[in-house]
Amino acid sequence: MAAPSPTSISEHFATLTDPRVERGKEHLLVDILTITLCAVICGADDWVAVATFGELKEPWLRTFLALPNGIPSHDTFGRVFRLLDPDELRRCFLTWVQAVVAAPGEQDAPGSLGPQVVAVDGKTLRRSHDRRTGKDALHLVSAWAAESGLVVGQVATDAKSNEITAIPALLKLLALEGATVTIDAMGCQTAIASQIVAQGADYVLALKDNHPTLHEHVRLAFVDADAAAGTSFSLADLTTESTVEKGHGRIERRRCQVIGDPAYLAFIDPHQAWPKLQSVVRITSTRRIGDEVSTETRHYLSSLPPDPARLQHAVRSHWGVENRLHWVLDLAFHEDSSRVRTDHAPENLAIVRHIALNLLRADPNRRIGLKNSRFKAALNDAYLRSILSGVHA
């Protein structure tokens, strides 16, 4: 690959264990990984495409790879990625991303994500199932750093229902000091909130009817606050922030209201089960498209102070994980269409997609969308080499 540097891919993946027996090692593991990464960046979606990329780009690949026995076959690529330990590949990915995602400010610890929103959300790779063997589709829980736009970690589960156990495992891998972690209602658990606080971060957790009593208490708190508004019983710290957005034929108004009054928080959480709970949030979204008007209300628990602008920013940033990660993986990388499904291959290839996405996103000179950036990399060896040369946040 490119010349070694403190943030080079090759350095952080050099310790990855080769799963092949010694007599079967005709190709170097680093060569297989690098060709696969280059091919995925350039648009490859399966092992035949990866091998085809390698064959057509062999003269260029030889400028920085050894390739002692030429380009591996598509069967070799598939076999290696079926056998690679995804936990080990994930650890290599995390050490790399922690080295290159510099947190804002000079005071942050090395590898810390710093004061940015880290959105945790799950996604099912819909076509990774195998009905013949009874294998369910792979479900990945990813952590996405909103300000840097990078995937900073992921773990796999067998089903969406297992996110509750996957989220703590993912959080444990991350340097969260100073960050704000946002999670949807599946992750609204006291144990998860405690872990986030213990790791030096704050939380904003979506609250729905999986906690019916708690949700009702929060709803009633805002109903009471609304009724008391303008009277001598009104709360001094029922704070509000409103925004209006126009575009694509619609007008959307979002109103963020926050309660931080200790008496109300004691009513909502009488046993203090939620660590460092400082605010509860109600966001009301009213959307107008033509003559149709719809309204949606959502509630959240947070360890952040009752600052509506900051809390609304955190919630909006979490929605970005759908638009800037999951949607991009489907549209630009065709992740939901991938039929790679044997053994560890789906999970390992998903990790490679995340690496490719991070590399493309980190290009400071990129002026086109990710789909066209992949097309440009396929056509322009110099551009592809610049993407591989190292990521510096």
Image (spheres, helix red, strand yellow):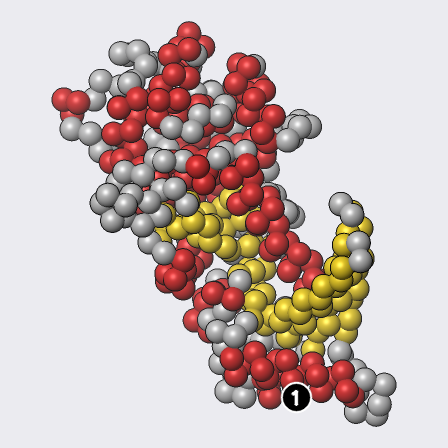
Estimate the x, y position of residue 80 in percent, counting from the top left.
27, 30
Q: Horizontal placement of 225 versus 32: left or right?
A: right
User: Quarter-wise, where is residue 13 in the image?
Assistant: top left
- Residue underneath mark 1: 263
Q: Looking at this view, is 307 or 73 the one in front?
A: 73
Task: Judge whether 266 appears above or below 151 on screen.
Answer: below
Q: Looking at this view, is 287 or 255 the one in front?
A: 287
View extreme (left): residue: 23
User: What amino acid is labelled 1 in the image?
Assistant: Ala
Estimate the x, y position of residue 210 in percent, counting from the top left.
48, 73
- The residue drawn where x is 79% and y is 64% is 242
Question: Which quarter of the rendered picture does the C terminus lie within?
Answer: top right
- The reply to whether residue 101 is in sight is no
- The reply to whether residue 337 is in sight is yes
Q: Looking at this view, is 369 or 275 the one in front?
A: 369
- The residue drawn where x is 67% and y is 66% is 296
